[in-house]
Amino acid sequence: MALSTAQRVADVLRDRIQAGELPPGTRLSEEALGRDLGVSRNTLREAFRLLIHESLVVHLLNRGVFVRVMEPADVTDVYRVRAALETAGVRAAAGAPRPLRAAVTEAVDRAERAAAAGDWREVGSADLRFHRALAALGGSARIDAAMDRLLAELRLAFHAMPSPRHFHEPFLLRNRALAKLLENGEYARAETELTSYLDDARQLILDAMRGDLLMTGPTTGTAAGPRAGGVLDLNADLGEGFGRWHLTDDDALLSVVTSANVACGFHAGDPSTMRRVCERAVERGVRIGAQVSYRDLAGFGRRAMDVPPDELADEITYQIGALRAFARAAGSDVAYVKPHGALYNRTVTDAEQAAAVVAGVLRAGGALPVLGLPGSRLHEAAERAGLPTVTEAFADRAYTAAGTLVPRRAPGAVVLDAGAVVERSVRLAREAAVTALTGEDVIVRARSLCLHGDTPGAAGLALRVRAALEAAGVRLEAFA
């Protein structure tokens, strides 16, 4: 059936809205558009009615027609409906015709090609096609029409994001992971991952709409830390599983961080996990670091232990060597070393244990940088031995007035409020400062920020932190 003139005009205006040529809040002038498109006012008004029905524009009495401005409640509602439609599609995937299943993978392929070409607008379009394809697995024309309307509305919300690339890039890998789960028939896992994925995307848009990704603060910095627009590494503890048990969402975090602290088998991790994380880190351009620990699988490396220095040094060398084999097999190498848990805390103040760690690093060879707390005994020992040192901060851990971490067992040791973690991250990057648990401002000079991977919602929180840092002008770049 041929389209009416009003429908064609609506198509043109819809395309301009979605392309950003008519951003939210723009008044649509009948006179200007009529002259531009060569149509009558009556035709324009009919086109406006079509777009109002699609929730893309609104009519304000005595003011005119405007491109709709999405409110946070609108975004929440759109994502709630999306989740219902898309997860229903995933549950129906097993019985979906082959062309519908192929459309999911084709959309992922298209997004990856667009990303390689630097066309982030097309990445966004392909991403929406991917989600439409997920809902289409249900085989319902009504669901397809509902998704088209929802995704058109969602385009309006995307205008709140500071950068299309920074919003879409981390989800490319998660799209591929979802497609693989569907290909492998792992429908329950795919539904769980999709639910988490949509929650994370919704929260990023809400942060931007509420201004959390456009935080303002001192732009002159301090003598102790970086100014706005500085450089920061994001690291996370990965590979913290064993056999069938998995603690960290490695795939999701590897799409966010610039450095991966890979468990080397003493507090967590096994050969297959180490290999897999190294391979995926190399695929994503993430630096590989050895997260060495006391030999404490049962206690996750968080129990205080007294290990003779010579024995500890041997165990450090052993762990680095094990990870190095997998890193090299994947086409990379171990780029740095970071102690884990109780060993990390012990080497802040214990010179003997710190020296043992450094001895183990030296024996492993390669003059590997040592990542740790500023002013620690570990860094003092590394510097004496001629090893590079890299300072680290934690946005989700409470600090003492002395600049050390509050012990995990103490009340308030872990910052649980996601908004506070995001805000602290930006302040650490821009001002090199954090508020101690007792209320004092503490200077923390850090080249790397740790995002813990074993906390609930870690991947979503990491996405929010990265987006906020980039919006604040911080360049994210590995130190090694």
Image (tube, rainbow, N blue to C red):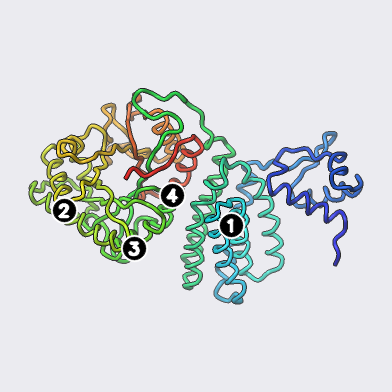
Q: The disc labelled 3 sits on which kind of residue?
A: Arg
Q: Position of residue 208 (x, y in %)?
A: 56, 40
Kindly report the distance in space between the C-alpha atoms of the residues bearing marks 2 and 3: 21 Å
Tell whether 445 sits left or right of 177. left
Where is mark 4, residue-wise?
Answer: 256
| Disc 3 secondary structure class | helix
Residue identifier under label 1: 127
Q: Could you tell me residue 214's position as x and y percent?
A: 54, 34
Query: Percent position (x, y) of residue 198?
Result: 54, 54
Report, in whole angstroms, how far the alpha carbon at label 1 lies from the one at label 3.
26 Å
Of label 1 and label 4, which has the lower sequence position?
1
- Crowding at mark 3 (Cα within 10 Å: few <14, some 14-19, many 20+): some
SS at mark 4 in the image: loop
Q: What residue type is disc 2 on?
A: Thr
Sort mark 4 into few (<14), some (14-19) or many (20+) by Cα contacts within 10 Å: many
**CB atoms at circles 1 and 3 under 8 Å apart?**
no
